[in-house]
Amino acid sequence: MALMQIHNTVNGTPRTIEMEPRRLLVHLLRDSLRLTGVHIGCDTSQCGACTVLIDQKCAKSCTVLAVQTDGSSVHTIEGMSEDPVTTALKRAFNECHGLQCGFCTPGMLMAARALLLATPHPSEEAVRDALHGNLCRCTGYQHIVDAVLLAANFLDASATQSTQEACHE
C-alpha cells in the first residue's frame, strides 16, 4: 500500500510522517512516536482511554485515521506537563483519590482539560456530561467528578473551598 505524508504538530513539535492511509492516529502516536500515554482499551471509541486533543477538541484516537490530522495540532497527555490546567487536574485527582490503576487517567485528564478550558466553572452535571465517554472500571466516578470540580477551584484564585469539603472525605 502506498504511503502518505502527514504534516501535523504533535505536542507542539511540527512533524512530517509517512504512513499507510489506513492507519489510526492511536497507532501513529503509540507506535511511531512512542507516546504511550495514549492507551488502547477498546478500539471502538467506547472507553476513552485513547482521548487526545485535535485542534483543542477531544477526539478518540482509536477511531481517527492518522491522515485526518494532516494540518492539525494534536496534543497527548505527554505534551501537557507544563500546562497549568493539567497540573491542577493532576493535583486534584491525587487529592480526591480520582484514580486507582491509572489506565483511564490520561484520557480522563484530556477530557477534563478540554472541559475546563471551555467552561472554567462547570457544574457537577457538566463534568459528568464531559466525561461520559470515558470509562473507569476501578473507581466510583464521584471521586473523578470531585477532582475536576476541585481543579476548577485551584484555577480560580478566589476559591475558598477546602480540599476536604471538595473531595467528600
Image (cartoon, grey):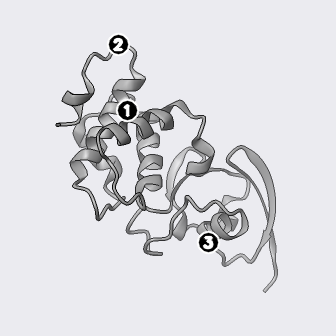
Q: Is residue 67 left or right of residue 83?
A: right
Position in image of residue 5 (x %, y %): 82, 66
Q: Residue furthest top?
A: 158
Residue at left 35%, top 48%?
130
Q: Is residue 42 left or right of residue 16?
A: left
| Earlier-in-chain disc, 3 versus 1 | 3
Q: Report the Cα–Cα distance between label 2 and label 3.
A: 43 Å
Dot 3 falls on a residue whose secondary structure is loop
Q: Is residue 169 above or below residue 160?
A: below
Task: Please identify the quadrant where the N terminus is shown.
Answer: bottom right
Picture quadrant of residue 79: top right
Position in image of residue 75 (x %, y %): 61, 49
Q: Is residue 42 above or below residue 98?
A: below
- Report which residue position mark 1 lands on: 151
| Earlier-in-chain disc, 1 versus 2 | 1
Residue at left 67%, top 59%?
69
Residue type, label 3? Leu
The local crowd at label 3, few if under 14, some if 14 to 19, many if 20 or more residues have their Cα within 10 Å, is: some
Residue 158 marker? 2
Residue at left 26%, top 56%?
139
- Report which residue position mark 3 lands on: 24
Q: Report the Cα–Cα distance between label 3 and label 1.
A: 32 Å
The local crowd at label 1, few if under 14, some if 14 to 19, many if 20 or more residues have their Cα within 10 Å, is: many
